[in-house]
Amino acid sequence: MRTIRLSWPPAAPLAPGPEVFLAPEQARHGAVVLRLTPGAVVEVVGPAGLAPARVTTVFPPAGLGLTLTGPWARAESLGGLRLALALIQGPRFDWAVEKSVELGAGALTPLITERTKGAEARCGQSRGARWQRLAEEARKQCGRSTPLTISPVMTLKELLTEAGASAEPGFYLNPGGEPRPAGLTSAGETPLLVIGPEGGLSPAETAALETAGFRPWGLGAAILRSETAALAALAVYRAAREG
């Protein structure tokens, strides 16, 4: 039987017992799309992981109350890699958003670079709400307690200006980089990783990154698609941190 999961906003963990009401979007999804009725057993994805719950009140289309019936479990501590991923063809970027949630990315910045296609840049400016929805659905599916932070679309210059205020390390993917550069998994830090579009970052962009202190990180000799490179980097980083 499929487990139905609903999400609670990131805030102080709830305690079992008192009835609480979900945010309108989640309530509408539960009441209208899933057609939940009082007594239905669900799971809540929230600030401390997963918790079992029972639906207690349904007021379509945007009211749904529930009570927790057990403690939170499976809370994870994400020191997630922050991704700055160049905008690519819509469905592929959507897929990267979903999988970034599952693999524990801490944040995602859609990036415009010199080789980002005009259509992709225009599309990226209007897809923020869609990416947030996809990320939230992925969070519920995998039981992740914290949402993926998705920044507004920005240029590489804007990203470097923003990153300049941070003392945390930065990297960019480059086939000639080291497989595990120094500082990649330093305790207490959340590195920022820049990933270029099809055709890669331009020489001027690479120079700007290195001037800003970003270091090259290599994932092997094969030329990977942007979304594949992002997920490979997340998997390598996660394994290194947990190993």
Image (cartoon, helix red, strand yellow):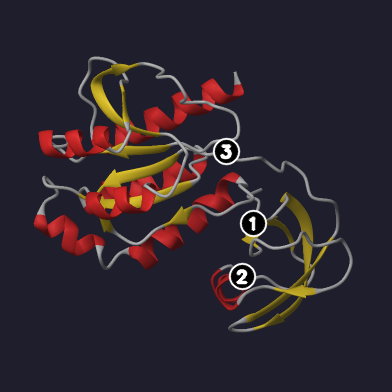
| Image location of residue 140, percent across then percent down | 58, 53
Q: Quadrant location of residue 173?
A: top left
Nearest to the observer: residue 178 or residue 227:
178
Give neighbour class at mark 2: few <14, some 14-19, many 20+ (Cα, 10 Å): many
Question: Where residue 79 is drawn, which disc sits there?
Answer: 3
Identified at 33% across, 33% down, the residue is 213
Dots 2 and 3: beta carbons under 8 Å? no
| Image location of residue 169, percent across then percent down | 43, 34
Q: Is residue 166 above or below residue 46?
A: above
Sequence-wise first label, 2 or 3: 2
Residue bearing the label numbered 2? 30
Residue bearing the label numbered 1? 4
Sequence-wise first label, 2 or 1: 1
Identified at 68% across, 57% down, the residue is 46
Q: Amino acid at mark 2?
A: Gly
* Disc 1 secondary structure class: loop
Q: Amino acid at mark 1?
A: Ile
